[in-house]
Image: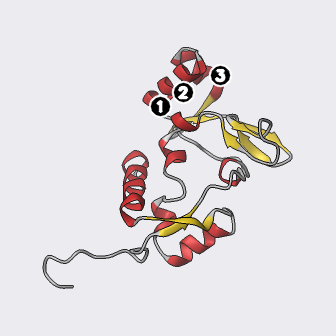
Amino acid sequence: MAHGSVQSEWYGEGLRFECTLCGACCTGPPGVVLVSDEEGALIAARLGISPEDFFERYTHPTSDGASINELLNAHGYDCVFLDRESDPGKAACSLYEDRPVQCRTFPFWPEHIRSPRDWNRLMSHCEGIGRGDVIPVDEIRISARRHSERYGK
């Protein structure tokens, strides 16, 4: 590599992604959706409750911090904030504007964009991969960096 040049990612032309509101990223086997104190305060304000009430009612402790609760149903373990009722056939986040960084940066987590193989593997779980407009590489980098800074991955 020449001096002063920047290494380009395999997705240098961007990646196609469009959320289809399928809910696959918000359900499945039991998982962890970490929520910081700051995120919890924003969500609590949206819900009209205190941060303490939010953490008590909607999260549980993990070794990495507070995680949003899930509800077991026919689809798997849904995030408690996944709304399948308002728009039949769709699954939407009821706190979309205030969702945690982990949700906000999906699908551009470092482990999903390491290689074309990792991205294509995610395609089998997320129908929005490869659809819609091209997300510019700079936006992908920002999401991946935000995720890494928050979760150390």
Residue furthest to the left in view is 3
Image location of residue 44, percent across then percent down:
55, 22
* Depth order, front residue of 26/92: 92
* Residue of label 2: 43
Label 1 and label 3: CA atoms lie apart by 15 Å
Count of all numbered marks drawn on residues in the image: 3
Residue furthest to the bottom in view is 1
Q: Quadrant of residue 142?
A: bottom left
132 in relation to 29, above or below: below
Q: Residue at point 59% right, 59% down?
A: 18
* Depth order, front residue of 112/30: 112
Please rate how many residues cluster around mark 3, counting C-alpha atoms within 10 Å: few if below 14, some from 14 to 19, many from 20. few
Assign a secondary structure to mark 3: helix
Assign a secondary structure to mark 2: helix
Image location of residue 54, percent across then percent down:
58, 21
Image location of residue 59, percent across then percent down:
61, 29
Q: Residue at point 70% right, 34% down?
A: 80
Q: Earlier in the sequence, mark 3 or mark 2?
A: 2
Q: Amino acid at mark 3?
A: Arg
* Depth order, front residue of 36/62: 36
Residue furthest to the right in view is 74
Q: Residue at point 73% right, 45% down?
A: 91
Please rate how many residues cluster around mark 1, counting C-alpha atoms within 10 Å: few if below 14, some from 14 to 19, many from 20. some
* Residue of label 1: 39
Q: Amino acid at mark 2?
A: Ile
Q: Looking at the image, do the residues carrying marks 1 and 2 touch, with CB atoms under 8 Å apart? A: yes
* Residue of label 3: 57
Residue furthest to the front in view is 133
Q: Amino acid at mark 1?
A: Glu
